[in-house]
Amino acid sequence: LIFETAQDAEQAFYRAFATADFGLLKSVWASRDIACVHPGGAMILDTRAVLESWNGILSAQGPSNLKVEVMYRLTQQGQAIHLVRESFGNGPGDDAGAVIATNVYKKDADGWHMYLHHASGAPVPAHHPQRPMSVH
Amino acid sequence: LIFETAQDAEQAFYRAFATADFGLLKSVWASRDIACVHPGGAMILDTRAVLESWNGILSAQGPSNLKVEVMYRLTQQGQAIHLVRESFGNGPGDDAGAVIATNVYKKDADGWHMYLHHASGAPVPAHHPQRPMSVH
């Protein structure tokens, strides 16, 4: 599979996530120099460990009703940064599973690949119990 | 102030953060097309709102014993992505305040500026109480 644009790579990434297709998801990631942070998780900088973490997530979660909205884009020759909102809710107002992710794509000799995925939990709406805040 | 490299901009950003110098921190951010996510927070895409959020953080927090380690870099002509570990702890093993941040810098006509800052709480070490995990 060759992804001709960052958008193509991103669409494949989220199709793979929604359908729990690890083979497809793996084909989106670059083979080296990648980084991943899951919500509340540590930095994963080793390619094999990144892929294993995704294999675990897809196996545990299975197919999901994932909706994705790209809220921000920054692009420079051969490198694209997208900030997206991933929503796992099943109905209106059900934002309990919303996640914010920064995705970085880069153009290699064989098309565009994902290099970085940094995800964090979006705030729970006011009618849900609040989660504790971290410092910053 | 002109930042000649992404590193210069990043050093100024964290010096400003550690010393609660809002004027310096503001000079690191680009004046438009920026995005910011604080730990557990929502996406902030409006320049004024990003700066106000930082003014609030610096006012509330004051000077801090901040240590920063760059763990990952991805650079392409005029655009740099850094994944850093920010530590607010005061002693060895005190990681209660550790944060992981993705920082994106871009070269403009007047030097390098920060365009995106996405921060999330790092996992609490095993000897601390666990925080709840989000989906993903």
Image (spheres, coloured by chain):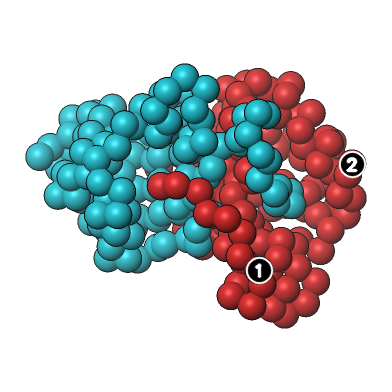
Chain colours: A cyan, B red
Say which amino acid is labelled 2.
Ser
Front in this rendered view, residue B4 or B28:
B28
Badge 1: residue crowd in 10 Å (few <14, some 14–19, many ≥20):
few
User: Could you say whether the residue bearing mark 2 is in a helix, strand or loop?
Assistant: helix
Of circles 1 and 2, the one toward us is 1
- What chain does badge 1 belong to? B
User: Could you say whether the residue bearing mark 1 is in a helix, strand or loop?
Assistant: loop
* Mark 2 lies on residue: B59
Q: Residue at x 40, y 39 (%)?
A: A103
Specify the quadrant of the image occupied by residue A16: top left
Compared across the picture, whether A78 is left or right of B10 comes to left
Q: Residue at x 25, y 46 (%)?
A: A62
- Spatial CA distance of label 1 from label 2 is 28 Å
* Mark 1 lies on residue: B129
Q: Residue at x 61, y 59 (%)?
A: B131
Front in this rendered view, residue B84 or A99:
A99
Mark 1 vs 2, N-terminal side: 2
Q: Position of residue B117 (x, y in %)?
A: 60, 40
